[in-house]
Image (cartoon, rainbow, N blue to C red):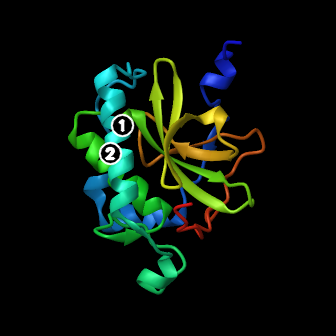
Amino acid sequence: MSKTAKEEFASTFGKASPPIGYVDFCARQPSECKATVSRSARLDLTPERWNLLYQVNNFVNGKIAPVTDMELYGEPEHWALPTDAGDCEDYLLLKKKYLEGLGFPSANLLITVVLDEKSEGHAILTITSADGDYVLDNRRNEILRWSDTSYKFLKRQSNRDPREWVSLTKQGSNQPGAFGGGSASNK
């Protein structure tokens, strides 16, 4: 059975507020949050690009030790580019940076906030491609289509401007601090 367009691509439902950790990260690292001037076209995932996605996902998942922000920084929410330890946002920031360095357009690498199987906040990197939206996750090396995860998708960056966020639910996720982070788990 083939996937429907709805299952291949996550729908957006208007504006959402960015997570407070992302806002703080951008204040500390403005060069990491610049708007791109390129058109936002869906990326063609060639075999070479798939290979790079797998390599980066596996490398970062193996390189970074899972540690909560409270353990690492002494605060409940702190987004940073990790060197050896971090939580879910830190993993995705490093993956995004590596992929951009390998020529992937930042407009196709979208930070995404979800609720996991335990209804806890979690962050992943969504790759928007011509044949669907895919997820790079610190909890698995496998790259899954967004609709093949067990997550509830809340919001993600706009592909037009990384400082703007869009809701992935009809109810919206516009609460300013609507991401408690929490999970450093790599499992």
Is residue 90 visible in the rendered structure shown here?
yes
Give the amino acid type for the residue marked by disc 1 in the picture.
Answer: Leu
- Residue ID at (48%, 76%): 69
Asked whether the residues under the numbered discs 1 and 2 touch, taking CB atoms below 8 Å apart as contact, a structural biologist would say yes
Q: Residue furthest top?
A: 1
Q: In which quadrant is the C terminus drawn?
A: bottom right
Classify residue 113 as left or right of residue 172: left
SS for callout 1: helix
Residue named by callout 1: 53
Which disc, if any, is residue 56?
Answer: 2
Image coordinates for residue 139, horizontal then vertical, percent: 53, 55
- Residue ID at (58%, 67%): 183
Classify residue 47 as left or right of residue 156: left
- Residue ID at (28%, 68%): 83
Count of numbered circles in the view = 2
Image coordinates for residue 11, horizontal then vertical, percent: 65, 29
Is residue 105 visible in the rendered structure shown here?
no
Image coordinates for residue 114, horizontal then vertical, percent: 63, 51
SS for callout 2: helix
Q: In which quadrant is the N terminus drawn?
A: top right
Q: Nearer the viewer, residue 176 or 125?
A: 125
Give the amino acid type for the residue marked by disc 2 in the picture.
Answer: Val
Mark-to-mark CA distance, 1 and 2: 5 Å
Q: Is residue 12 above or below residue 47?
A: below
Q: Around disc 2, counting alpha carbons within 10 Å, would you say few (fewer than 14), some (14 to 19), or many (20 or more)?
A: some
- Residue ID at (58%, 53%): 17
Image coordinates for residue 155, horizontal then vertical, percent: 61, 46
Q: Nearer the viewer, residue 159 or 153?
A: 153
Q: Nearer the viewer, residue 187 or 42?
A: 187
Q: Around disc 1, counting alpha carbons within 10 Å, would you say few (fewer than 14), some (14 to 19), or many (20 or more)?
A: many
Q: Residue furthest right?
A: 171
